[in-house]
């Protein structure tokens, strides 16, 4: 149950892919098509993390320096039928400069 975060945001007109980020896997530009290898759809979760699915091993490894970040393509909102409010920052890399 629940909804994929990337799909949910794109359906609602929220652009995710950070133009400032380089792909984690190749260092190039562009996204991986939701395979969870590029990390260009990363979002920062400041509230409501308990509503999200647990991180998988790949996501843990890629984002180990930023524990509050999630890969939207690999994250399910409403995991375990949970409901509530969330605060998500899109393209967190642009705010760290």
Image (tube, rainbow, N blue to C red):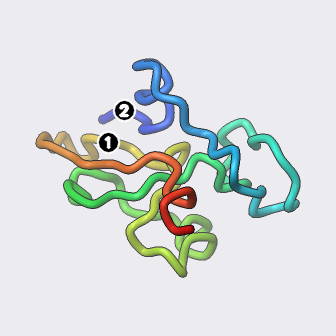
Quarter in which the C terminus is drawn: bottom right
Residue 74 screen position, x and y as percent: 52, 49
Q: Is residue 23 left or right of residue 81?
A: right
Q: Dot 2: within a 10 Å radius of its alpha carbon, few (fewer than 14), some, or many (20 or more) residues?
A: some
Q: In this view, does 64 lie to the left or right of 40?
A: left
**The residue positioned farthest toward the bottom in the image shown:** 65
Of 58 and 39, nearer the camera is 39
Q: Dot 1: within a 10 Å radius of its alpha carbon, few (fewer than 14), some, or many (20 or more) residues?
A: many
Of 61 and 56, nearer the camera is 61
**CB-based contact (under 8 Å), mark 1 and mark 2:** yes
Of 3 and 93, nearer the camera is 93
Q: Report the residue at 41% width, 58% height from top.
A: 44
Q: Report the residue at 46% width, 27% height from top.
A: 14
Q: Can I make out residue 37 in this image?
A: no
Q: Name the residue under label 2.
A: 3
- Please tell me whether residue 92 is drawn above or below residue 79 in the rendered image: below
Of 26 and 80, nearer the camera is 26
Quarter in which the N terminus is drawn: top left
Residue 66 screen position, x and y as percent: 48, 74
Q: Report the residue at 55% width, 43% height from top.
A: 73
Q: Going from the N terminus, do you reach mark 1 or mark 2 first?
A: 2
Residue 22 found in image quarter: bottom right
Q: Report the residue at 63% width, 70% height from top.
A: 62
The numbered dot on residue 49 is none
Q: How many marks?
A: 2
**The residue positioned farthest toward the left in the image shown:** 84
Q: Mark 1 points at which residue?
A: 77
Residue 16 found in image quarter: top right
Residue 5 found in image quarter: top left
- Please tell me whether residue 95 is drawn above or below residue 30 in the rendered image: below
Q: Can I make out residue 34 in this image?
A: yes
């Amino acid at each position: 149950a629940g909804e994929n975060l990337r799909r949910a945001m794109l359906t609602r007109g929220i652009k995710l892919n950070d133009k400032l980020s380089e792909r984690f896997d190749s260092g190039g530009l562009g996204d991986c098509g939701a395979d969870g290898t590029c990390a260009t759809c990363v979002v920062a979760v400041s509230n409501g993390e308990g509503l999200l699915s647990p991180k998988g091993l790949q996501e843990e490894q890629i984002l180990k320096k930023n524990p509050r970040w999630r890969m939207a393509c690999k994250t399910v909102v409403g995991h375990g039928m949970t409901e509530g409010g969330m605060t998500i920052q899109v393209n967190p890399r642009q705010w760290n400069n």
